[in-house]
Image (cartoon, helix red, strand yellow):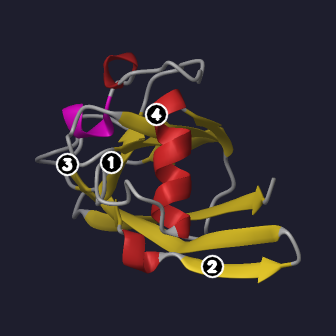
Amino acid sequence: MPAVSTTVKYTRVGRGSLLANAFGGADVGVLFPATVQLYTNSVTLTETITQANFVDLQDSIPYTAGTITPASWIVTTSGDIAVAKHPSIRVSITTDRTTLNANANVRGYYILGSDSTTVLWAGSFPSPFVVNKTPNGQIVDLFIPLEIQWRAP
């Protein structure tokens, strides 16, 4: 599956942690490595969103969450602008009759800190990604690219 574009909202905690993680700040290891989780409910993304706001795909379909580590970021600079890119994060979903009772709509992703409770940021897909039940099972790989820009003050 190709990489998907998303609308992103950083939480108050996540904004600083993301910048530190990508650009090598003091609290790099505090909430990283982080994991990329998938959600299925319709939710408004805000700076104060918490894990309780999401219905995780894991509640109905097993999947392997993606991982974000400080060493994975590639940082480039041009003048007073720095850009940090993280290689597309792979999330693998297994769809078979024993684990999937019905089709599921994945509406977006959220990044969960290593403490397994702090939401750092979240993204919503332009339209839900449908995971279909298949008779013999298959693995659906979803690739989520991350990029942030920072302008020096």
- Secondary structure beneath label 3: loop
Give x and y (percent) for residue 110. Answer: 44, 40
Badge nearest the viewer, 3 or 2 = 2
What whole-number distance in Å separates the C-alpha atoms at marks 1 and 4?
A: 37 Å
Badge nearest the viewer, 1 or 4 = 4
Q: Is residue 11 left or right of residue 51?
A: right
Confirm or deny contact between disc 4 and disc 3 (CB under 8 A). Answer: no
The disc, 3 or 2, on the residue closer to the chain's N-terminal end is 3
Quadrant hosting residue 127: top right
Badge nearest the viewer, 3 or 1 = 3
Residue, disc 3? 62
The disc, 1 or 4, on the residue closer to the chain's N-terminal end is 4
Residue 104 appears in the figure = no
Disc 1 residue type (three-letter):
Lys
Give x and y (percent) for residue 20. Answer: 49, 57
What whole-number distance in Å separates the C-alpha atoms at marks 1 and 2?
A: 39 Å
Disc 2 residue type (three-letter):
Val
Residue at x 46% of width, y 33% of height: 13
The label on residue 75 is: 2
Confirm or deny contact between disc 3 and disc 1 (CB under 8 A). Answer: no
Q: Residues within 10 Å of mark 3 (few under 14, many from 20)?
A: some
The disc, 1 or 2, on the residue closer to the chain's N-terminal end is 2
**Rendered position, 143 above or below 54:** below
Q: Which residues are magenta?
A: 56-60
The disc, 4 or 3, on the residue closer to the chain's N-terminal end is 4
What whole-number distance in Å separates the C-alpha atoms at marks 3 and 1?
A: 13 Å
Disc 3 residue type (three-letter):
Pro
The disc, 3 or 1, on the residue closer to the chain's N-terminal end is 3
The label on residue 133 is: 1
**Rendered position, 141 above or below 130:** below
What whole-number distance in Å separates the C-alpha atoms at marks 4 and 3?
A: 28 Å
Residue, disc 4? 13
